[in-house]
Amino acid sequence: MIGVMATREAQRLAESRGLDLVEITPNANPPVCKIMDYGKFKYEESIRAKQQRKAQKSTQVKEIKFHPGTDVGDINHKLRQIREFLAAGNKVRLSLQFRGRENAHRDIGEDKIAEVLDMIRDECYVEQAPRTDGRIHFCLIGPPRKGGAKQPSAPQNPAGGIRISVS
């Protein structure tokens, strides 16, 4: 940290070292700048982004289908499948399709989805609440979320120039 100084002075300092003056946070008061080799920084940033893409885990959306007449044994089997999918980190779409006369008794189907959600309430996070779209009643659940991470707050400096650090 060099401290707060005038922009022209910071540019001269960067040129004397053969480096670039890069504005990091323009909206801060005063703006934060860094004296660095910008080409090297961009190269290292692209390498980091490539490694993050390589290490990123892709999640899939698995679908479990129900009907209003699905019985207890079948529901237990489907619950085991849902738990396996959630343990693997996948999201699960629970869908219940109404056929023929089942459309007249939609409340039975909606109760079936609510019953399944009650059985696995502690093991999942409901990402999309149950809703009906045409003949299909569905909801989307995912693995339980971990504790929310707090965002760091930006330090405040007095106005009158820009804040500089060298790397």
Image (cartoon, rainbow, N blue to C red):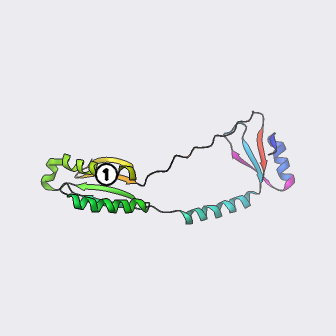
* Mark 1, other Cα within 10 Å: few <14 / some 14–19 / many ≥20: few
- Decide: is 59 above or below 32: below
Residue sitting nearer the eye, 86 or 127: 86
Q: How many numbered dots are placed on residues in this image?
A: 1
Q: Is residue 22 magenta?
A: yes
* Residue 22 appears left or right of 84: right
Residue at 69% x, 62% y: name it. Answer: 44
Q: Is residue 111 magenta?
A: no
Residue named by callout 1: 119
Residue sitting nearer the eye, 47 or 82: 82
* Residue 103 appears left or right of 88: left
Picture coordinates of residue 100, whole percent (x, y): 14, 55
- Decide: is 8 above or below 50: above
Residue sitting nearer the eye, 93 or 20: 93
Q: Is residue 116 visible?
A: yes
What kind of residue is marked 1?
Met
Residue at 20% x, 58% y: name it. Answer: 71
Picture coordinates of residue 116, whole percent (x, y): 29, 52
SS class, disc 1: helix
* Residue 39 appears left or right of 46: right
Picture coordinates of residue 29, whole percent (x, y): 70, 36
Provide the residue span drawn in magenta.
16-25
Q: Is residue 61 visible?
A: no
* Residue lying at the far right of the rendered structure: 16
Examine the image and state in which quarter residue 65 appears.
bottom left
Examine the image and state in which quarter residue 152 appears.
top right
Residue at 73% x, 37% y: name it. Answer: 30
- Decide: is 96 above or below 55: above
Residue at 15% x, 52% y: name it. Answer: 102
Picture coordinates of residue 88, whole percent (x, y): 43, 63
Q: Main secondary structure of the magenta part?
A: strand
